[in-house]
Image (cartoon, grey):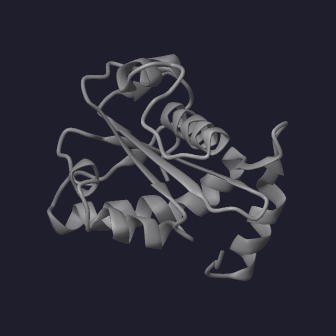
Amino acid sequence: MEFNNLFTSLLIRINKFQDENNYFVYSFSYFSVISNLHLSLLNKERAKLKLGLLTYSNCLMEAAQDQSSYMLSKKNLTYSNPHGDLFSIARFYGQKKVNNVYENIGYAYEDDKDIIEEFMKGPQKENILNKKVTQVGVGVAQTKNGPLYWTQFFTDGTCSKYNYIA
């Protein structure tokens, strides 16, 4: 995995840890710094079409991280989830007033830039550029030497937990 600078690389080493299944997961402090790049790339694509900018939702961040970890545990890309459909997942993690929920998943992309570039070439582009969504959450999981499992959740709701704008 390549990173833009040494500071970013060090932060990832500090905030990456192994769970009970020996999978690597990333703490939210990782996302508060590193995912600013992810959010910036998403918003750059939306700005090209003069769409509203997305903000991060802590609720969706947790949901996306859970989905990435779930896919890793299954060693398979899947839209299925033990918490049910997308609306159930969003509500389970505290997202309120949800009328629209969308999900993008990906596997093996090395970094934020790579996955967003690929998503913008495929049907996932519709979710990124959806006029109805205002919030996003991103999750990433990997085994020690394995590929990354990515999840993006998008909604128009609000998070019942403290939200920050990146």
Query: Percent x, y for residue 7?
Result: 74, 75
Between 54 and 83, the one lying in front of the other is: 83
Query: Percent x, y for residue 46?
Result: 24, 60
Q: Quadrant of residue 115?
A: bottom left
Q: Residue at x 31, y 67 (%)?
A: 44
Between 160 and 117, the one lying in front of the other is: 117
Between 125 and 62, the one lying in front of the other is: 125
Q: Quadrant of residue 74?
A: top right
Q: Residue at x 23, y 51 (%)?
A: 52
The quarter of the rendered structure image containing the N terminus is bottom right
* Above/below status of 82 relative to 153: above
Q: In the image, 83: left or right of 6?
A: left
Q: Residue furthest front?
A: 75
Query: Percent x, y for residue 121?
Result: 26, 68
* Above/below status of 4 relative to 83: below
* Above/below status of 104 relative to 118: above
Query: Percent x, y for residue 135?
Result: 37, 41
Q: How many marks on residues? A: 0
Q: Residue at x 40, y 46 (%)?
A: 55
Q: In the image, 33: left or right of 158?
A: right
Q: Residue at x 34, y 27 (%)?
A: 157
